[in-house]
Image (cartoon, helix red, strand yellow):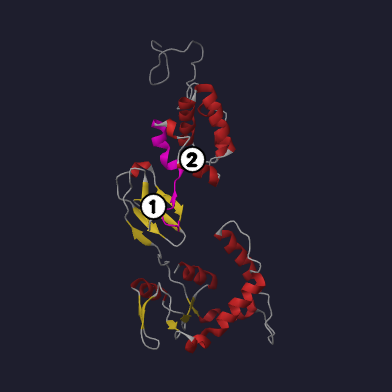
């Protein structure tokens, strides 16, 4: 369904006649005689939202000719642009590459035609139905319970969430490629979807409050391993941690690092390099700003307004 939504955006509308399908398992619960199908409830709601009809091809060789040009074009595109298989770092990078290829394909001239593929598409855009004002939410809403490890289990995979949710049921939205966890209407966590049974993914930011009380667990935590693998725990953090432990010892130095991470939560790692007292690994205090001494005299007990007593 998310693939349909993305395709409709690129096309700029919805096909007005119909869309041809094989017997998609997420869409078809049961194949009946001829072209009769028992569709799933979500698929029926999706088609109704976008207002298109599904043309179901006959299974087997009998219906192979009904989508022959689609199969042929898919093979041509793969042999031309995807052989050898592209080496990309992520699915987003592959999609970006495919967008570039699509733009190049718009200039291609078909055999026996005097116009390009892109020109022919523009001339047919009036045949598309307009997009609805709101997108259809393709994700599935779940309410898993957060265990004592600050994780939720979704489809036999485990995801960390902020520690303040331990023992509570949270609202989660499972999409094709990501999982969103909500706190009321705000997104509390956004994680890439895991696919292997028993796989887990911990985020260091979700455990900072716990690690502040138990700094000894920091070095061997799975969240720290994940942060190093993903690059969110950078060389800057490593250098600060080493300097803080050298100046104050393991426990106090680790607390200093965690306090800095809490202060600069969701900020670039370069913020740790700021030259203030909170980010100084050799400083005596990392929790607040240093007080200014009053001008014209020594520092002493102050009132709320910052003056010394008796003034």
Q: Mark 2 points at which residue?
A: 224
Residue 249 horizontal/vertical position (percent): 49, 23
What's the residue at 44%, 53% (across, down)? 199
Front residue (pair 242, 121): 242
Mark 1 vs mark 2, foreground winner is 2
> Which residues are the magenta region?
193-213
Asked which secondary structure carries label 1, the reply is strand
Crowd tier of the residue under label 1, counting other residues whose Cα lies within 10 Å: few below 14, some 14–19, many 20 or above: many
Asked which secondary structure carries label 2, the reply is helix
Horizontally, residue 147 falls left or right of residue 232, namely left
What's the residue at 50%, 45% (across, down)? 226
Please indicate, yes or no, whether residue 282 appears anywhere in the rendered image: no
Q: Do the residues labelled 1 and 2 touch (CB within 8 Å)?
A: no
Q: Mark 1 points at which residue?
A: 181
Residue 69 horizontal/vertical position (percent): 57, 83
Crowd tier of the residue under label 2, counting other residues whose Cα lies within 10 Å: few below 14, some 14–19, many 20 or above: many
């Amino acid at each position: 369904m998310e693939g349909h939504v993305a395709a409709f955006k690129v096309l700029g509308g919805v096909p007005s006649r119909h869309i041809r399908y094989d017997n998609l398992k997420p869409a078809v619960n049961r194949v009946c005689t001829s072209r009769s199908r028992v569709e799933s409830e979500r698929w029926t709601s999706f088609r109704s939202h976008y207002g298109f009809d599904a043309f179901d091809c006959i299974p087997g060789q009998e219906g192979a000719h009904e989508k022959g040009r689609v199969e042929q074009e898919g093979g041509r595109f793969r042999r031309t642009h995807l052989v050898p298989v592209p080496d990309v770092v992520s699915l987003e990078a592959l999609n970006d590459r495919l967008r570039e290829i699509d733009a190049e394909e718009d200039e291609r001239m078909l055999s026996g035609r005097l116009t390009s593929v892109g020109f022919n598409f523009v001339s047919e855009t009036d045949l598309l139905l307009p997009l609805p004002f709101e997108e259809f939410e393709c994700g599935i809403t779940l309410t898993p319970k957060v265990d004592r490890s600050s994780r939720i289990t979704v489809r036999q995979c485990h995801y960390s969430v902020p520690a303040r949710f331990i023992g509570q049921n949270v609202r989660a939205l499972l999409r094709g490629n990501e999982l969103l966890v909500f706190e009321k209407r705000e997104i509390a966590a956004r994680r890439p979807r895991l696919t292997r049974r028993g796989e887990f993914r911990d985020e260091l930011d979700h455990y900072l409050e716990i690690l502040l009380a138990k700094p000894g667990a920091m070095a061997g935590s799975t969240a720290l391993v994940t942060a190093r693998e993903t690059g969110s725990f950078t060389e800057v953090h490593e250098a600060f941690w080493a300097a803080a432990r050298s100046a104050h010892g393991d426990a106090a130095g680790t607390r200093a690092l965690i306090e800095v991470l809490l202060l600069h939560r969701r900020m670039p790692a370069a913020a740790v390099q700021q030259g203030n007292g909170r980010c100084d690994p050799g400083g005596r205090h990392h929790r607040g700003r240093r007080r200014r001494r009053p001008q014209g005299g020594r520092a002493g007990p102050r009132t709320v307004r910052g003056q010394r007593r008796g003034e």
